[in-house]
Amino acid sequence: MVVASKKWKEKNPNYHHGHYLNNKTKYIAASAKRRAVKNSATPFWLTAIHRAQIQEMYDIALAREVQTGVKHHVDHIVPLMGKSVSGMHVPWNLQVITAKENLTKGWRFQCQR
């Protein structure tokens, strides 16, 4: 993954917006695919408490972002669309990490030892 330098971003502030506008259908399709995978990875047997725990993870990510000023994501420990293994959208497969950490990780499963 290539990360643009801070100087480049300052000189090209509208690059991402322009790229989105030029490739809007691809972004919409990718978003729909991700949503469909997430929905199919959410088991029917989750209880209301499980669903509340999932929502709580998103609330925690937002709270950390507000407190620290650093963007946070809710990450699937075992990715929903991994190459070697696919996880589920359940509370025990979620963690809150920084956006930078999450985007660096990509769709790889990193075994915790």
Image: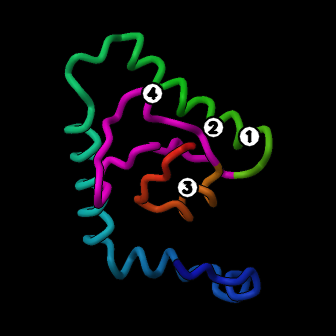
Q: Quadrant of residue 40?
A: top left
Distance from Cα at disc 2 to Cα at disc 4 = 19 Å
Disc 3 crowd rating (10 Å Cα; few below 14, some 14-19, many 20+) is some
Q: The residue under label 2 is which amino acid type?
A: Leu
Percent x, y of residue 12: 64, 86
Question: Upstream in the sequence, badge 4 or badge 1?
Answer: 1
Distance from Cα at disc 2 to Cα at disc 3 = 15 Å
The residue at the point 56 percent across, 82 percent down is 2
Q: Nearer the viewer, residue 20 or 75?
A: 75
Label 1 sits on residue: 66
Question: Upstream in the sequence, badge 2 or badge 4?
Answer: 2
Label 4 sits on residue: 92
Label 2 sits on residue: 62
Distance from Cα at disc 3 to Cα at disc 4 = 17 Å
Q: Is residue 48 left or right of residue 76?
A: left
Q: The residue under label 4 is which amino acid type?
A: Trp
